[in-house]
C-alpha cells in the first residue's frame, strides 16, 4: 500500500513557534485544503483594463488542488493574474502539478494575503505582508512566470518525508519501498525545478533540513539565486557563526537510551527512568547527540527531567562553545532547565552539558495521550546558532503508565519511611 508523501513541517505541527506556546497546529484556514478567491486591484471605473487581478491561494496543498485550481482558472477571467500564496505546503505531487498549471496559464506568483476589508489605507484585495510560503509551497511559487517575495514575507523549506512518520521520524521504521517513493519524488522535484528555471540551490537547501528541525527561512540572496524572487536585492552577507559537523560515528553515546523511541529503564535496585536518545543536528549536519532522562521527582506527581548533551568538533577546529541555555517546549509550557555542568571532558574534543528541570505529571500525561504529540528542545550558546530539535512520543504512551506507577510506589515508600522516623523521635 502506497503512503502519501508530504513536504510539510512544522510544523504545520512541527513549525516551532518562536515564543512559548503549544506546538500543536491551530485549526485555521491554512490547515484546510487550499481555497482560491479572485480579487481586482480596484474598481473598474478607476483603472479600467489596467486593473491588476489577484488570485489569493491559502491553505494546504492536496492531490486534488491542481484540478480545482485549473477549473477555477477556466471559470473566471484571470488574464495576467498574480497568484498570491499563503500556505504551509502539503502534497509533493500536488504542489508540482499546481506549479505546472500556474506556468501553463502564464500567471505570476508572489507571497502574501488579502487585507481585511476596512483596513486603514488599503483597499480590499491588495496584497498584504507578512505571509509565509512553507515547504512545498516554495515549489508552487517557482511556477510563476514572474516571481516576487515581499520583504516582510518568508519562504521556508525542509525535507520531504513520509507523511505518516514525520511526527517522530527518528523512531520510525522504513522499508525499501518507502525509500523508492522518496527517491522518486526527489527526482520529480529536481526535474520540475530545472523545467521552471529554478536554481539547484533550492533543492539542496530543502533536502538539508530534517523533519525534527525547524524549517529553514531563505535569505534574500538565496531567494534570488534559487529563482524564487526576480526582484530580490542582495543584502549584506550574513556574519552569523556556523556550526561544524562531525561524523555520527564519532559521537559518544550514553548507551542506555533508545533512539528508536522512549524506553523504560527499570532495573532491580535502580530508580526507574524513562529515556530517549536523539541526534543533535544543525541544518541537517550532525554536531553531537543528547539524551532526555525522566526520573521520579521528590514530590508525588512531579518528575525530574535531565538533558545530557555531547557536542564534538574536529581536531582542526576550536572546541564547541559552552551551552548557556536549555529550554523545553511541551504542550503550552515553556520550561527552562538549570544547567549544572557544561565543560570539555578531559583531552577530548567534546563538551558535555548536563541540565535538569522539574515537570508536572499532567504535562507528561498529555504528551502520552495523542500519537502526534511532540516536544521541542532548544539550546543557546554565545556566538553560535541556536539548535532546536523536535522529538515525538513513540513508545512514551506504552511506557509512561508503568513508569508513573513505579514512581508512585517509590514516593509512598519514602513517605512511609519518613513517618516511621518521625514516630521514633
Image (cartoon, rainbow, N blue to C red):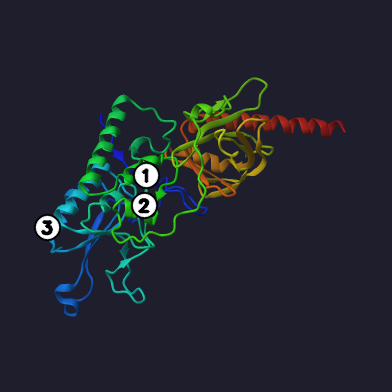
> Does 256 sit left or right of 200 as displayed?
right
In this rendering, the count of numbered labels is 3
The first of marks 2 and 3 along the sequence is 3
Tag of residue 74: 3
Residue at the location (27% across, 50% down)?
33
Confirm or deny contact between disc 1 and disc 2 (CB under 8 A): yes
Q: Is residue 160 left or right of residue 44?
A: right
Callout 3–callout 1 Cβ contact below 8 Å: no
Kindly indicate the quadrant of the structure image that contains residue 168.
top left
Q: Which element type, helix, strand or loop, lies under badge 2?
A: helix
- Residue closest to the eye, 277 or 3: 277
Provide the residue designation for mark 1: 205
According to the image, label 2 marks what residue?
Answer: 222
**Marks 1 and 2, the one that precedes in the sequence:** 1
Q: Residue drawn 32% across and 68% down? A: 115
Side of 231 where 392 appears, left or right: right
Secondary-structure class at tag 3: helix
Residue 63 seen from this side: no
- Image location of residue 116, percent across then percent down: 33, 69
397 displayed left or right of 31 = right
* Furthest-top residue in this view: 268
Amino acid at each position: 500500500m502506497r503512503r502519501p508523501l508530504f513536504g510539510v513541517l512544522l510544523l504545520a505541527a512541527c513549525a516551532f513557534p518562536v515564543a512559548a506556546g503549544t506546538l500543536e497546529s491551530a485549526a485555521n484556514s491554512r490547515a484546510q485544503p487550499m481555497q482560491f478567491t479572485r480579487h481586482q486591484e480596484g474598481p473598474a471605473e478607476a483603472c479600467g483594463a489596467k486593473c491588476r487581478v489577484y488570485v489569493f491561494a491559502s491553505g494546504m496543498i492536496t492531490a486534488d488542488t491542481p484540478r480545482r485550481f485549473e477549473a477555477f482558472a477556466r471559470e473566471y477571467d484571470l488574464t495576467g493574474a498574480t497568484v498570491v500564496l499563503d500556505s504551509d505546503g502539503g502534497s509533493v505531487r500536488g504542489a508540482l502539478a499546481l506549479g505546472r498549471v500556474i506556468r501553463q496559464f502564464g500567471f505570476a506568483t508572489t507571497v502574501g494575503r488579502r487585507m481585511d476589508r476596512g483596513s486603514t489605507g488599503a483597499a480590499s484585495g491588495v496584497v498584504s505582508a507578512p505571509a509565509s510560503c512553507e515547504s512545498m509551497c516554495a515549489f508552487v511559487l517557482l511556477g510563476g512566470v514572474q516571481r516576487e517575495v515581499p520583504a516582510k514575507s518568508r519562504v521556508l523549506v525542509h525535507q520531504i518525508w513520509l507523511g505518516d512518520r514525520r511526527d517522530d521520524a527518528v523512531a520510525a521504521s522504513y522499508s525499501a519501498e518507502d525509500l523508492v517513493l522518496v527517491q522518486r519524488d526527489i527526482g520529480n522535484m529536481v526535474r520540475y525545478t530545472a523545467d521552471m528555471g529554478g536554481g539547484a540551490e533550492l533543492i539542496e537547501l530543502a533536502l538539508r533540513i530534517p523533519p525534527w528541525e525547524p524549517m529553514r527561512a531563505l535569505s534574500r540572496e538565496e531567494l534570488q539565486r534559487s529563482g524564487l524572487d526576480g526582484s530580490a536585492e542582495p543584502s549584506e552577507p550574513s556574519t552569523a557563526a556556523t556550526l561544524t559537523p562531525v561524523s555520527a560515528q564519532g559521537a559518544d553515546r550514553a548507551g542506555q537510551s533508545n533512539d528508536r523511541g522512549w524506553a523504560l529503564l527499570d532495573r532491580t535496585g535502580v530508580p526507574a527512568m524513562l529515556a530517549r536518545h536523539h541526534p543533535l543536528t544543525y541544518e541537517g549536519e550532525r554536531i553531537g547527540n543528547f539524551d532526555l532522562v525522566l526520573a521520579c521527582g521528590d514530590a508525588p506527581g512531579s518528575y525530574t527531567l535531565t538533558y545530557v548533551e555531547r557536542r564534538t568538533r574536529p581536531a582542526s577546529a576550536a572546541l564547541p562553545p559552552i551551552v548557556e541555555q536549555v529550554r523545553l517546549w511541551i504542550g503550552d509550557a515553556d520550561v527552562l532547565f538549570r544547567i549544572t555542568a557544561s565543560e570539555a571532558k578531559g583531552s577530548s574534543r567534546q563538551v558535555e552539558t548536563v541540565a535538569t528541570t522539574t515537570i508536572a505529571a499532567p504535562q507528561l500525561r498529555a504528551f502520552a495521550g495523542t500519537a502526534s504529540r511532540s516536544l521541542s528542545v532548544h539550546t543557546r550558546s554565545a556566538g553560535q546558532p541556536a539548535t532546536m530539535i523536535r522529538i515525538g512520543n513513540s513508545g512514551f504512551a506504552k511506557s509512561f503508565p508503568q513508569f508513573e506507577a513505579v514512581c508512585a510506589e517509590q514516593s509512598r515508600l519514602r513517605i512511609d519511611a519518613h513517618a516511621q522516623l518521625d514516630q521514633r523521635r
